[in-house]
Image (tube, grey):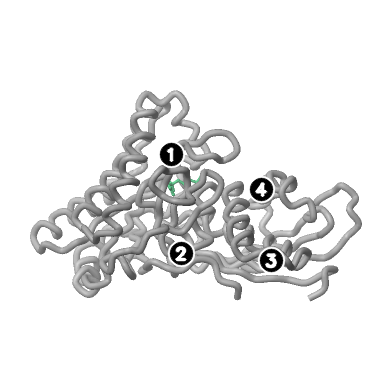
């Protein structure tokens, strides 16, 4: 690999928030801290090819999605580059080809911005490392997360596994508004290999982009209350992850999901992002949990799909329940089995 031209390839996973990030300040600073499980199977794989050029002040790149030129994704990537030039001035010396693909179906309603921005950011760090081989591994990972955050806030939680915190919190050592950090304490056995089965309820275009969603928290009547609740829930979930109290975990995670949607229902303008089948699924999960005492719960992103979370020890039982009772509520019967994973991989 010379400094003139070459390529890197990284995969980066998606993540699912337990305590949600919803609302931000300027420069992609979160209004409250959040915590997520890094996923394993839902990934973006991105190859970054670079070629040295004269720095003529013009920046250009080509974008391929699944091998085909993809013009409509370009503005978002262009904006990302513009935001990070000041931290990576070397970018202007190269022409790039970004060749990207996801392991999950396109337009499945699963946001690819977290995995996509994380994969691109860490590729850029590989180039920085070639130009400056003395940078440490910690610097590499931290700056990859820092750059990913500037692409899409939650992307900064997709560089590392298995549980990542983003946003300043008094009880999480090393936590920062600028990048994600691995959950610093040791995690109880109950949460090792935690499972996430994603039920694809509605594969349509998102009704509300997350940019618009975050903006709705400006002047929101319940914003301050919500931000302090997130701090409180992060303290609580920290203890839960350490002591293995799955029942308490369920209460925090489901309340966070419904609060996220409550914020959207009580903003101006207001939105309902759940579909009838989202509610059917939630009710079925509650019934199954009551009847069988199985530790299964749900969480939601800013859309209608349902993430079903459960310990590995209950996998067989829960998958059977999903197949028997929930698949009928999924669009074309589609769902994706995932679990906690380790973060981005050079591949
Ligand atoms: O990263 P963004 O700006 O797309 O925001 C994502 C916000 C949620 O997915 C709804 C919650 C979260 O913390 O991931």
Q: Name the residue under label 1.
A: 32
The CA span between labels 2 and 3 is 19 Å
Q: Position of residue 253 (x, y in %)?
A: 29, 50
Q: Quadrant of the N terminus?
A: bottom right
Q: Name the residue under label 4.
A: 80
Q: How crowded is mark 4: few (under 14 residues within 10 Å), some or many (20 or more)?
A: many
Are discs 2 and 1 less than 8 Å apart at CB?
no
SS at badge 1? loop
SS at badge 3? helix
Asked whether 103 or 92 is in front, the reply is 92
Is 316 on the left-hand or right-hand side of 41? left
Asked whether 206 or 219 is in front, the reply is 219
Q: Earlier in the sequence, mark 2 or mark 3?
A: 3
Q: Quadrant of residue 163?
A: bottom left
Q: Which residue is drawn at 56% across and 46% down?
A: 178
Cβ of mark 3 under 8 A from ligand 1? no
Are discs 2 and 3 less than 8 Å apart at CB?
no
Q: Which residue is drawn at 46% across and 65% down?
A: 42
The CA span between labels 2 and 1 is 20 Å
Q: Quadrant of residue 327?
A: bottom left
Q: Which label was assigned to residue 126?
A: 3
Q: Nearer the viewer, mark 1 or mark 4?
A: 1
The CA span between labels 1 and 3 is 30 Å
Q: Earlier in the sequence, mark 1 or mark 4?
A: 1
Q: Where is residue 20 in the image (x, y as percent from the top left)?
A: 39, 45
Are discs 1 and 3 less than 8 Å apart at CB?
no
Q: Position of residue 321 (x, y in %)?
A: 19, 67
Q: Which label was assigned to residue 161?
A: 2
Q: Which of marks 3 and 4 is in front?
A: 3
The CA span between labels 3 and 4 is 17 Å
């Amino acid at each position: 690999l010379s400094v003139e031209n070459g390529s890197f390839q990284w995969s980066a996973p998606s993540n699912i928030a337990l305590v949600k990030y919803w609302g931000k300040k300027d420069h992609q600073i979160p209004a409250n801290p959040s915590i997520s499980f890094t996923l394993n199977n839902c990934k973006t794989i991105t190859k970054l090819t670079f070629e040295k050029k004269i720095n003529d002040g013009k920046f250009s790149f080509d974008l391929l999605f699944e091998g085909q030129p993809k013009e409509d994704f370009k503005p978002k990537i262009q904006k990302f580059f513009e935001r990070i030039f000041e931290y990576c001035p070397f970018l202007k010396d190269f022409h790039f080809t970004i060749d990207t693909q996801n392991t999950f179906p396109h337009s499945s309603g699963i946001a690819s911005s977290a995995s996509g921005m994380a994969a691109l950011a860490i590729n850029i760090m590989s180039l920085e490392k070639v130009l400056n081989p003395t940078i440490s591994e910690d610097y590499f990972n931290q700056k990859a997360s820092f750059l990913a955050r500037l692409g899409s806030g939650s992307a900064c939680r997709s560089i590392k596994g298995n549980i990542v915190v983003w946003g300043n919190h008094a009880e999480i050592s090393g936590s920062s508004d600028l990048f994600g950090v691995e959950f610093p304490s040791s995690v109880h056995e109950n949460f090792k290999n935690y499972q996430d089965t994603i039920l694809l309820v509605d594969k349509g275009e998102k009704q509300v982009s997350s940019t618009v969603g975050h903006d709705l928290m400006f002047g929101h009547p319940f914003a301050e209350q919500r931000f302090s609740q997130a701090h409180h829930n992060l303290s609580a979930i920290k203890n839960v992850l350490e002591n293995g109290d799955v029942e308490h975990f369920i209460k925090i995670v489901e309340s966070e999901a419904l609060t996220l949607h409550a914020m959207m229902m009580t903003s101006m303008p207001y939105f309902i992002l759940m579909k009838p089948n989202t509610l059917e699924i939630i009710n079925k999960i509650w019934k199954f949990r009551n009847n069988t005492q199985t530790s299964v719960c749900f969480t939601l992103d800013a859309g209608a799909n349902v993430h079903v979370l459960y310990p590995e020890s209950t996998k067989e039982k829960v998958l059977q329940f999903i197949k028997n009772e929930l698949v009928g509520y999924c669009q074309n019967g589609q769902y994706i089995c995932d679990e906690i994973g380790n973060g981005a991989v050079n591949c």
